[in-house]
Image (cartoon, helix red, strand yellow):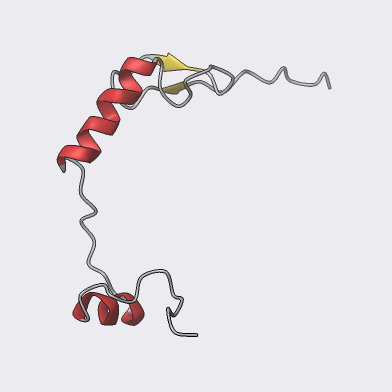
């Protein structure tokens, strides 16, 4: 049986929907413009993580006002 030719996996740009190859320079976007549009949406708060935080350590850190970031101690 002859081997099947593997087709290159094509994906779509998350911003405009144009076809993009993994080998493209701006992957997973089709262009730097689409990459910047996506970054702007994150920066403006248009994208949000909608699932609730269930990790007890993260909830404790949030309750403390986020003062435990970095996991390290400033005391020597």
Q: Position of residue 21 (x, y in %)?
A: 53, 18
User: In the figure, 70 relative to 3: above or below?
Assistant: below
User: In the figure, 46 relative to 59: above or below?
Assistant: above
For residue 62, side relative to residue 12 (left or right): left
| Number of disc labels | 0
For image coordinates 20% across by 49% down, the residue present is 48
**Frontmost residue, 76 versus 64:** 76
For image coordinates 25% across by 24% down, the residue present is 37
User: In the figure, 2 relative to 60: above or below?
Assistant: above
Residue lying farthest bottom?
76
For residue 57, side relative to residue 72 (left or right): left
User: In the figure, 75 relative to 28: above or below?
Assistant: below
Quarter of the picture holding the N terminus: top right
For image coordinates 20% across by 56% down, the residue present is 50
**Frontmost residue, 68 versus 36:** 68
Residue lying farthest front?
76
For residue 24, side relative to residue 60 (left or right): right
**Frontmost residue, 11 versus 72:** 72
Q: Position of residue 42 (x, y in %)?
A: 24, 39
């Amino acid at each position: 049986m002859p081997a099947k030719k593997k087709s290159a996996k094509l994906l779509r740009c998350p911003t405009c929907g144009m076809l993009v190859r993994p080998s493209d320079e701006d992957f997973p976007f089709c262009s730097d413009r689409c990459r910047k549009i996506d970054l702007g949406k994150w920066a403006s708060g248009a994208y949000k993580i909608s699932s609730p935080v269930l990790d007890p350590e993260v909830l404790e850190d949030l309750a403390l006002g986020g003062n435990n970031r970095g996991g390290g101690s400033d005391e020597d």
